Structures are given as C-alpha cells and as structure tokens.
Image (spheres, rainbow, N blue to C red):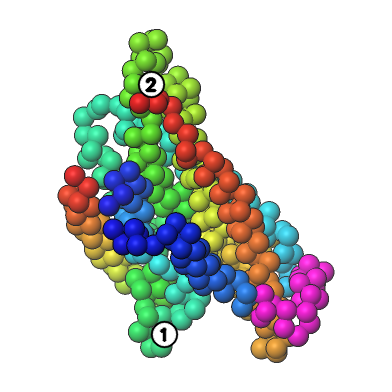
Amino acid sequence: MHPMLRATHITIILALLLGSFRAFEIVLLSTGGGPSDNTEVVGTYIYGYVTSAGSTIGFASAASVVVLVVALLGSAVQMLFTRRGSR
Amino acid sequence: MTDGALGLIARRRRDRLILAVMAIAFLFPLYSAMTEALRGGGLSNFTSLFTRPLGGIAIWKTYINSLIVDALHASIVVSVSTMAGYAFSKLQFAGRNLFYYGSILFLAIPGTAILVPLYYVTHQAHLFNNYAGVAVPEAALTIPFGVLLMRNFRDNVPDALIEAAIVDQADHWQIFTKVFLPIAKPAVVNLTVLCFMWSLQDFLWPVIFFSDPKKTTAAQAVQSFHATLTESPIDAARYDASLVVLAVPAVLLVIFGLRFITGGLTGGAVKD
C-alpha cells in the first residue's frame, strides 16, 4: 500500500511506537498516575520517586536502569519487525 | 474497485464529508478551551493575565525563556542530525548500520529514565538555571528522531548529484552544504518546526533544572499558575485563559511552519 510513502511511514510508525514509551507530561498533569496507580507509566513512576522526600534516589536509579534495558530491548524488537516489513 | 460505482462528484463530496467530520473532531478541544477560558470574566480573563503577573512571573517573560531554550535546542538538533543524516545515507564507512540503528534505539528512552544521572551531571557542570542545562538534554533526546528523519529523506537526494559533485572534486563539506542541505531543506525546516514545538511543550527538564522564577518557561508556567490560583470559578477561568495564551505560539508555529513543509516536499532535483 502506498509504496511511494514507505520512508515516511517507517519514520512515523517508528517514532510514534517508540515515542509512546516517553509519555510523561500528559499523564503527570492529567491523572498523576492515579487513581491509586492505575494510570502509572514508567515516566511518572520514576518521577514520583525522584521528587518524593526520603532516601528513594537509589530506588529511582534502579528503576531507571530497568526502564533503560526494557526500552532498548523493546525498540530493538520493533526495529527488527519494521526492517523486515520494509524489505 | 468500489470507487467506480460512485461518480467523481459523489466521491469528492464523500471525501469532503470525511474531512469535515475529522476537522470538527480535531477542533473540538480548541472550542472547549476557548469557552472555558471566556467563562465568567470574558475577555478580561485574558487581559488580566498580562497586567497582573501570576506568582511573580510575567507571562511574556516565559515566552522569551521558552524561545531561548527553543532556539538552542533546535540549533543543536538540526546541526547534528543533518550531518549524521548525510553520513548515514551518503557515506560508506565501517559499522554504518550499527551506528545508525544504535542511535535509533534511543528513540524509546524516556527522559525520566536518565533523570538521576543527568541531575548529577548538571550539578557537576553548574548548569542549574542555565538555558543550556535544559536545551542540551532536550537535544540529546530529540537527536535520534532527527537522525531518523534526515536519513529517511535520503531517497530524495539522488546519488547522481553526489557523484557529480565528487567528479567536480568537491570535498564532503562542500557536498554537504552545497548539495545535500539545499535539497534536504524541507526536511530541515520540518525538523526545526518540530524541535520548536517539542521544546515548547517540554515540561520535565524546566521543572527539574529551573528553580529560578526568572527562568520559567511557558510550559512550566502552566503549573506555576495552577499553584498560585485558587479554586474560585473566576480563577479557574483565568487558568484556562493562561493555557490558551500559552498554546498560541505553538499554533502559530504550526500554521506558518506547515506552509514551508508542504511547499518544499514536492520539489525534486533529478527528473527521471
């Protein structure tokens, strides 16, 4: 479908899929992760630990590392699929 | 196909109907924002924003701060992404795909995931309340997208032109500035507009790194306003008015930027 738009489609699909991992502002400002933690995304989760009082910075760092690994793995998998689809 | 059953006029009418429904759906938030902002005081909700600063922040000053961060962010992203895009699409070197996919991997990294180390780095570099302290992390997070965009534009820059320049003994810098950049202009403008828009919307880095009210950016101001206003209906309307005012630059940017993007996309260099 639309072979001339292939490059554009790849750009948009990759950017949106991977970019959704970055959702933060809208969630923080609208629900703040609540009610309880039902709409929590990784962004607001870490932000909560970074800004909360007490010695939670180590926990936030650990969570960051986990998120980094998961995000990198996720984008690697997505990239493999998009590459195969585009050939 | 099914289109054959419909006449040309009927098809056009159908398309227009679909577009109209979508336009109304997309315009509805704008409509509700405006009605909420005008509730109670009417237009005075807007004028009072400029005459009475909220929480010690003059609203025009937040625009200037945003503009400075925007410009820094956009210039870093555009200069790095165009050069990377050129290298990844037109140069042959070992590990090209590895580096390319390596940088694209970072499209998914959320800003909050690098918050803790970045806080430490910013502290060490004394970049708190410094425009660069916000613009540089923003740029680092936007560059993967810029590289993706610029490299996917490569098909629009024909190899024949690059080869012709090489025959004319142009070096890479000349090819980049005199051949690649002029043809890639639509993509560059596109990227610049997106950079401005994302920087304008960015909330996380200003909140973390700008504690000085004088440095407050437009997106950050939304929350500062929220904190200073009370629950009364008139203040709620003023808050909504401030949201509308803060959205104006982004809307203007899209309206005027879009013209450049669509204007340049149809041009090609080599006619086959």
At which x and y percent is residue B199? 53, 55
Chain for numbered disc 2: B
| Along the viewing direction, whichever of B267 and B66 lies nearer the viewer | B267
Q: Which mark is residue B271?
A: none
Q: Is residue B200 left or right of residue B57?
A: left
Chain letter, disc 1 residue: A
Q: Position of residue B202 (x, y in %)?
A: 52, 60
Residue drawn at x 51%, y 38% is: B264
Q: Nearer the viewer, mark 2 or mark 1?
A: 2
Q: Residue at the spot x=34%, y=62% of the render?
A: B5
Report helix, strand or loop for mark 2.
helix
Q: Position of residue B218 (x, y in %)?
A: 63, 62
| Residue that mark 2 sits on | B161
Front position in the image: A43 or B107:
B107
Residue B189 highlighted magenta (yes or no):
no
Within 10 Å of the Cα at label 1, are there few (<14), some (14-19), or many (20+) other Cα atoms? few
Determine the residue positioned at 21% across, 29% down. Answer: B94
Circle 1 residue: A34
Instruction: Find residue A77 and report its image quarter.
Output: bottom left
User: Disc 2 residue type?
Assistant: Leu
* Local crowd size for mark 2, using a 10 Å CA cut-off: few (<14), some (14–19), many (≥20): some
Look at the image and give the residue range highlighted in magenta: B34-53
Q: How many marks?
A: 2
